[in-house]
Image (cartoon, rainbow, N blue to C red):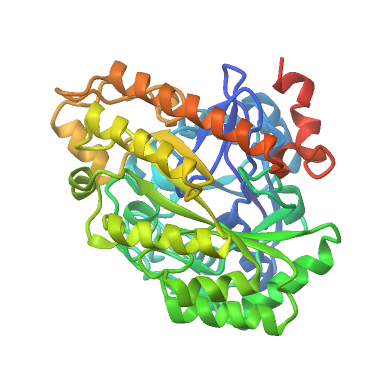
């Protein structure tokens, strides 16, 4: 068979680009602000190539900015027997319109995966999917294909979910049909970096989290063999001569202190500490001993998911104490400042249980932390209830959900909830105040010599071929 592994659509009917990270959240913009490597599909592509005799090809129509018509024309020309596509709430409607255009022209079976089909598998089947892989999908789809499309395959609806995979059974993700080098427009990276995924999962459970609640269905944390990660870094360094760094873009890279220390030691031993490293993580395992090891290995920045600095608000969002201990957080920030490790934090406005006061208090605290040199960069979003998460269920049950327009559920433009004591309009107003401060921080950092690689026109040349810089800043 000919199997096409396909990302979601690239550009919506309004002419905006989808910037995708389905296992977290996606958003729209008038140009490609970021390009994230579609790692779950990338692993699936490599698995199918390694473990089957089928002809497998991966196409990233999202990266290419394909519209419904363009994407369907490309897929029809390929004449595949099977299409696998990952869809989320933001892209689902237009993904299905595009796939049905293909199905009308080619006798193809569609396997749908991702957060929206996992939440509403019956709807996905009614709308045109032939199979729906629920949750973490790589092994389910591999087994479905290897079995000759056995309807009893675990992880394929209506069967029960498959146990979470062993990350050490995965090959390196796809680097032929799509290349890791090209996924280079990464937000607030300061070097020429690409993504690597050393771990998967998170032991915490936040009420808005797509990864834990939909892909994994439960808190978890899995680690790849340290030697495998080091070999992958070495391979990427050889494959990309201009590479300067690695972004461990996982849910929580440092959740296991012993593992992180072993990885740092292995990086140094392999002579790869000349690269610059950064990671997405939480602060609960970080201490001076571990941060010193990370600094020695070449970690220059850590990215911490905070969402809010209000403890009472934290109690409404997080299921455990790991993300609501400000004393511990400030200790970590102080150690990072002394060691010269930069800190980037993520914050959200309009989280469940927030008020205008708690969000503005977080903004004022963030300003103080920046001025004190404890935080260097940050990201802000409107906390948006994605179908399938507890956050979505709560606001829908209480009548706080004011729109189910999937085109609005991106957290970067408008709010879809309104609380009795915190209106949609107030949330959007406060979001703009955070954005104003973010613009100040970015401008100030660049004046102080920070070079963000997303503005490095030679490094992101391929991305700019799709949306030239002249378009982006007019």
Which quarter of the image is occupied by the N terminus? bottom right
Dividing the picture into quarters, in which one does residue 74 lie?
Answer: top right
How many numbered callouts? 0
Report the side of 149 relative to 382 (left or right).
Answer: right
Dividing the picture into quarters, in which one does residue 65 lie?
Answer: top right
Above-or-below relation of 432 to 299 = above
Q: Tell me which residue sits at (73%, 74%) in the image.
A: 272
Q: Tell me which residue sits at (46%, 50%) in the image.
A: 23
Q: Tell me which residue sits at (36%, 18%) in the image.
A: 429
Q: Nearer the viewer, residue 186 or 312?
A: 312
- Percent of width and height locating residue 438: 51, 32
Q: Nearer the viewer, residue 433 or 237?
A: 433
Which quarter of the image is occupied by the C terminus? top right
Report the side of 409 relative to 240 (left or right).
Answer: left
Above-or-below relation of 156 to 472 = below
Q: Tell me which residue sits at (30%, 16%) in the image.
A: 425
Confirm whether residue 141 shows in the render: no
Confirm whether residue 88 shows in the render: yes
Report the side of 368 relative to 236 (left or right).
Answer: left
Q: Nearer the viewer, residue 291 or 75?
A: 291
Report the side of 360 relative to 164 (left or right).
Answer: left
Above-or-below relation of 20 to 407 = below
- Percent of width and height locating residue 249: 55, 57
Q: Nearer the viewer, residue 445 or 28?
A: 445
- Percent of width and height locating residue 78: 74, 43
- Percent of width and height locating residue 108: 60, 44
């Amino acid at each position: 068979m000919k199997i096409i592994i396909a990302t979601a659509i690239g550009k919506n009917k309004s002419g905006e680009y989808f910037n995708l990270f389905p296992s977290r959240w996606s958003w729209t913009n008038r140009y490609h602000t970021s390009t994230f490597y579609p790692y779950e599909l990338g692993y699936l592509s490599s698995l199918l190539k390694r473990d089957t005799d089928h002809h497998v090809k991966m196409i990233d129509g999202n990266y290419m900015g394909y519209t419904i018509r363009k994407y369907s024309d490309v897929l029809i020309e390929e004449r595949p027997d099977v299409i696998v596509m990952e869809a989320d709430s933001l892209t689902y409607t237009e993904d299905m319109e595009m796939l049905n255009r293909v199905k009308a022209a080619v006798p193809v079976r569609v396997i749908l995966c991702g957060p929206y089909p996992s939440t509403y598998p019956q709807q996905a089947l009614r709308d045109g999917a032939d199979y729906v892989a629920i949750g973490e999908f790589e092994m389910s789809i591999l087994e479905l294909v290897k079995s000759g499309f056995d309807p009893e395959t675990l992880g394929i609806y209506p069967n029960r979910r498959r146990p979470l995979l062993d990350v050490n059974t995965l090959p390196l993700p796809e680097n032929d049909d799509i290349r890791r080098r090209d996924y280079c427009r990464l937000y607030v990276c300061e070097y020429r970096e690409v993504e690597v995924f050393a771990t998967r999962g998170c032991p915490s459970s936040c009420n808005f989290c797509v990864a834990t609640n939909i892909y994994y269905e439960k808190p978890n944390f899995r680690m790849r063999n340290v030697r495998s990660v080091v070999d992958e870094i070495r391979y990427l360094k050889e494959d990309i001569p201009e590479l300067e760094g690695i972004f461990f873009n996982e849910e929580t890279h440092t959740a296991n202190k012993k593992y992180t220390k072993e990885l740092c030691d292995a990086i140094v031993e392999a002579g790869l500490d000349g690269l610059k490293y950064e990671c997405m993580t939480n602060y609960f395992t970080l201490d001076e001993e571990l941060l010193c090891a990370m600094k020695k290995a070449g970690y220059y920045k850590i990215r911490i998911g905070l969402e809010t600095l209000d403890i009472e608000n934290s109690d409404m969002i997080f299921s455990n104490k790991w993300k609501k201990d400000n004393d511990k957080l400030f200790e970590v920030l102080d150690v990072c400042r002394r060691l010269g490790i930069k800190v980037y934090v993520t914050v959200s406005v309009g989280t469940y249980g927030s008020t205008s006061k708690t969000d503005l208090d977080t903004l004022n605290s963030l300003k103080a932390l920046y001025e004190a040199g404890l935080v260097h960069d940050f990201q802000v979003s409107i906390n948006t209830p994605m179908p399938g998460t507890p956050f979505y269920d709560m606001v829908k049950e209480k009548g706080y959900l004011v729109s189910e327009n999937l085109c609005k559920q991106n957290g970067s433009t408008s709010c879809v909830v309104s609380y009795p004591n915190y209106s949609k309009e107030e949330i959007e107003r406060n979001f703009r105040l955070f954005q104003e401060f973010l613009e100040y921080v970015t401008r100030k950092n660049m004046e102080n010599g920070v070079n963000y690689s997303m503005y490095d026109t030679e490094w992101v040349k391929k991305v700019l071929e799709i949306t030239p810089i002249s378009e982006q800043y007019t």
